[in-house]
Structure formats: C-alpha cells, structure tokens
Image (cartoon, rainbow, N blue to C red):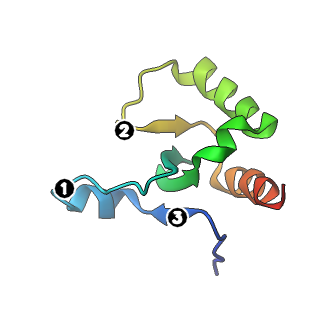
Amino acid sequence: MGFRLPGIRKASLPAIQASSKAVDVPKGYLAVYVGDQMKRFMIPVSYLNQPLFQDLLSQTEEDFGYEHPMGGLTIPCREDVFLDITSRLMRC
C-alpha cells in the first residue's frame, strides 16, 4: 500500500534504465536517488534552503563526496526516512 506526496515525484530505477533518453527533470526540481533500491525522486529546489534538508545533504557529502554513481544526487537514507523528512518540508 502506498501513498503519494504532492510536490514529490518518484520513478523506479528499472523504468529509468529502460528508457534510452534521460528522464527530464521539470524546471524548479532536483532529481535525487534514495534508499536501497535507489528510487528516483524529484524534489523542489526550494528544499535546498531548508536546514532539515541541508543536514541530509551534509550526510550525503560525508558518505559519497561529490561522485555519484547514478549520475545524480544519492541520498544515504531509507526511503521511509526521506519521505518523512520531505513531508515535514512540505508543511513549512
């Protein structure tokens, strides 16, 4: 059973890899990969200014540096934690 959060878009890695073209990221959004299955989410760039999200980015820098094997930003946390954080940011 799943739920959808407005402002966050998700695409599975196999769906992305199956496409011969890169998936477009809408203007004003940033693509990130999260969780063990590296699910792709598109988040509003406005999250980058939020202290809670900046903490997540600091952890990413510590774990991965600036090399991201997926070609996008990889966030080192479980998907449910990421969804909890982004749902809090949507309320701000």
Label 1 Cα crowd, 10 Å radius (few <14 / some 14-19 / many 20+): few
Sequence order check, earlier mark of 1 and 2 = 1
Name the residue carrying label 3: 9
Instruction: Relative to 32, say whether 66 is above or below.
Output: above
Instruction: Relative to 49, say whether 18 is above or below.
Output: below
Q: Say which residue appears at 83% left-offset and 61% top-offset.
A: 91
Name the residue carrying label 2: 70
**Cα–Cα span, label 3 and label 1:** 18 Å
Q: Say which residue appears at 62% left-offset and 64% top-offset.
A: 7
Sequence order check, earlier mark of 3 and 2 = 3
In the rendered image, residue 31, in percent from the top left (x then y), is placed at: 47, 48
In the rendered image, residue 2, in percent from the top left (x then y), is placed at: 63, 77
Residue projecting furthest to the front: 27
Q: Say which residue appears at 66% left-offset and 77% top-offset.
A: 3
Q: Quadrant of the C terminus?
A: bottom right
Sequence order check, earlier mark of 3 and 1 = 3
**Cα–Cα span, label 3 and label 2:** 17 Å
Q: Quadrant of the N terminus?
A: bottom right
Quadrant for residue 72, please give it. top left
Callouts 1 and 2 close, C-beta under 8 Å:
no
Give the residue type that dot 3 points to: Arg
Mark 1, secondary structure of its residue:
loop
Quadrant for residue 77, please give it. top right
Label 3 Cα crowd, 10 Å radius (few <14 / some 14-19 / many 20+): some
Asked whether 80 or 30 is in front, the reply is 30
Q: Nearer the viewer, mark 1 or mark 2?
A: 1
Residue projecting furthest to the bottom: 1
Q: Which mark is residue 21?
A: 1
Callouts 3 and 2 close, C-beta under 8 Å:
no
Mark 2, secondary structure of its residue:
loop
In the rendered image, residue 79, in percent from the top left (x then y), is placed at: 63, 54
**Cα–Cα span, label 1 and label 2:** 15 Å
